[in-house]
Structure formats: structure tokens, C-alpha cells
Image (cartoon, grey):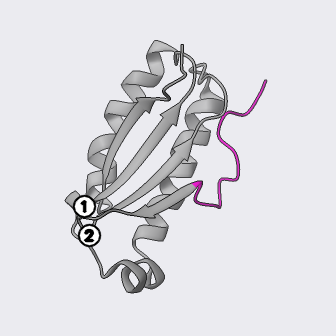
């Protein structure tokens, strides 16, 4: 089974926006099949992103932006298993409690 979410202890893509917000992107490199392993990979990665957002380093670098300006974005390829869409929705309130917003979006070349 391929691992679509890798390097759990690293931020895949990080960038400041012109509106003083911050985007932290998770890149799923293959289709999220809905297996317990894929769900755990996503949740572990989000947990590490939330830990970074709560860190003094993040707050110092990005001037401690409000939660509505911090976005964790999952960029996925292919069509995730339907169960993954339910996982995406369940992640939203958890991420909000952690000081950010969450959304999942298909990559432009996703099928």
C-alpha cells in the first residue's frame, strides 16, 4: 500500500499570504483510499501542523495571526474514498480548536 501522506514531522508547504494570513499545505501524493492507515496518516500530519501552529517559533515568525487567517489545506490527487470526505469534515472543528481552519481540495490535475 502506498503512503499518500509522508514526512509526518515536516510541513510540506508553508507560505505567508498578503492578508497577513498563513497557509500550511499537506500534499497527498497518491489517492487517499479510506483505509485506517490513510486516515491515521492524515490525522497524525494535522496533529503535527497544529503543534507547529501553537509553537513559539510559528508565533514569532508570523506575528501570531488569528485562527481565521491560518489555513491548513490538504491538496489531494485522484478521488479520495468517500469515507475520507467524512474525515475531512470531522477534522474542521478539531483544527479550529487548534487555532486554524481546515479545507481539502483537489489538485488541478486530479481526476
Which residue shows up at 55% across the image and 40% down it?
Answer: 42
Q: Position of residue 104 (x, y in %)?
A: 40, 34
Quick check: 56 left or right of 42? left
The residue singled out by tag 2 in the image is: 20
Between marks 2 and 1, how big is the CA–CA gap? 7 Å
First reached walking from the N terminus: tag 2 or tag 1: 2
Assess disc 2: are there few (<14), some (14-19) or many (≥20) residues with their C-alpha within 10 Å of its C-alpha: few
Mark identifier at residue 4: none
The magenta stretch is: 1-12
Mark 2 or 1: in front is 2
Q: Nearer the viewer, residue 77 or 109?
A: 109
Secondary structure category for the residue under label 1: helix
Which residue shows up at 37% across the image and 81% down it?
Answer: 59
Q: Is residue 10 magenta?
A: yes
Quick check: 104 left or right of 28? left
- Residue found at the far right of this picture: 1
Q: Position of residue 54 (x, y in %)?
A: 40, 73
Tag count: 2
Dots 2, 1 in contact, CB < 8 A: yes
Secondary structure category for the residue under label 2: loop
Vertical order, 73 against 71 (above or below):
above
The quarter holding residue 105 reads: top left
Mark identifier at residue 69: 1
Q: Is residue 8 magenta?
A: yes
Which residue shows up at 49% across the image and 36% down it?
Answer: 75
Amino acid at each position: 500500500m502506498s503512503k499518500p501522506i509522508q514526512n509526518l514531522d515536516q510541513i510540506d508547504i508553508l507560505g505567508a499570504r498578503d492578508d497577513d494570513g498563513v497557509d500550511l499545505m499537506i500534499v497527498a501524493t497518491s489517492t487517499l483510499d479510506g483505509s485506517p492507515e490513510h486516515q491515521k496518516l492524515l490525522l497524525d500530519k494535522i496533529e503535527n501542523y497544529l503543534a507547529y501552529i501553537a509553537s513559539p517559533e510559528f508565533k514569532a515568525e508570523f506575528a501570531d495571526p488569528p485562527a481565521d487567517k491560518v489555513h491548513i489545506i490538504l491538496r489531494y490527487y485522484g478521488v479520495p474514498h468517500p469515507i475520507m470526505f467524512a474525515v475531512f469534515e470531522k477534522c474542521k472543528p478539531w483544527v479550529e480548536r487548534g487555532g486554524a481552519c481546515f479545507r481539502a481540495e483537489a489538485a488541478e490535475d486530479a481526476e
